[in-house]
Amino acid sequence: MSQSSELDSQEYEITPLELFFDLVFVFGISQLSHHLLAHLSWHSAAETLVMLLAILTVWSYTSWAATMTCAEQASTRGMMLAVMLLGLFLNASITWAFAESGWVFVVCLLGIHLGRTVWSIVSAQEAFYAEHFTRVLYWFAATAPLWVLGAMVDADSRLWWWAAAIMIDLVGTWLAHPFPTRRLQSVGKPFDASRMLERCRLFLIIALGETVLTTGTAIAASSMTLMTALTGAFALVGSIALWALMFLGRAHELSDQHQKQTDNPLLVSRKTVLTTMFLVAGLVAIAVANEIVIAHPHAAPSVALSTLLVGGSIVFLLTQAWYSHSVLSLDSKRHALGIAAMLAVGLLTLATPAYLSLILVCSTLVIFVVVEQLVTRHERSE
């Protein structure tokens, strides 16, 4: 049996090590939430987004490498544990990456990307994979000077250098890291897309857990009043609605079928990873908004809070709509209507106190979930 047929026929379960590996990124998401909450401004939001995308590329590329091989192999375990070690310090350095020195963040990030990519080249089970990861290495080497230059300058300038670097990294991911006259022809190439989908789903549960943790932390830090109970309950209801949108809808069912039937699992998995990144970004914004509302329920209307609460929800719905349309070829009209409704709610939140803004947004999400469930049941009955 050829290596290609082996890759096609074998499926590996998610391993305990991979779940253990994800815990480092639970810490990272929590760090980012705290960073944004402590420095609530447009500049801080941009910093948070840049660092979030950076650590998500670490998670996604490492998970991809473990899926490409077998996570039970000793060499794969060693690679993941090495990434965990550097990832711990990468995520710990979020606190001071834009305040004091960015060197720890950059050294850990580049060490992970360059080291793991070299490992992927050596460990590739197919020649086309080795060639592809060689191009990936060139892309990471091209952005490395931008990360280094960012660490050398002041915090304000650092944001621009690092934003440029992460944008190039995202473009590389989107385009499958092409090189002059060479690019990945992924149709028919072996890859366990179903496994990668499951890895992304598990990570989304982790990110969703951050909304629950911040809600619980905010409740614990507040005096138990009727308003605390009200805002805490609605924050949790909102998180439940987001969970339902991810795991109870028609798209969830069709994704499993599509991953198994597609003739281009690499392309589908790339889109799944990018979808995960932006869903997590929306969840982080919502988590921070929940904590603000519970701590200050009577706060006056603010653009910052509305942007986090409504903007995070819109990013979530927009990303879901894109995935449903581009990967599953589903009609996204309901998502478009949901986004329009959320925009209208966003205008209302500019004139309502914080607690009422939370109630409006969460109620809109719940209504959208109910509509989705009714439509899904109708489609199943046909």
Image (cartoon, rainbow, N blue to C red):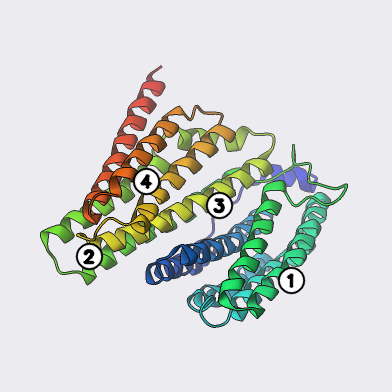
Q: Earlier in the sequence, mark 1 or mark 3?
A: 3
Of the numbered discs 2 and 3, the one sitting upstream in the chain is 3
Distance between mark 1 and mark 4 Cα atoms = 39 Å
**Residue 267 percent across, percent down from the top left:** 67, 42
Whether the residues at callouts 1 and 3 have beta carbons within 8 Å, the answer is no
> Label 2, on which residue?
219
**Which amino acid, by three-letter code, is at mark 2?**
Ile
Alpha carbon separation for disc pair 2 and 3: 37 Å
**Could you tell whether 281 is left or right of 58 in the image?**
left
Residue 145, numbered label:
1
CA neighbours of label 2 inside 10 A, class few (<14), some (14 to 19), many (20+): many
| In this view, the mark in front (2 or 3) | 2
Does the residue at mark 2 contact the one at mark 3 (Cβ under 8 Å)?
no
Query: Residue type at mark 1?
Result: Pro
Sooner in the amino-acid sequence: mark 4 or mark 2: 2
Q: Rounded to the nearest whole Å, what is the CA distance between mark 3 and mark 4?
A: 26 Å
**Left or right: where 347 falls relative to 136:** left
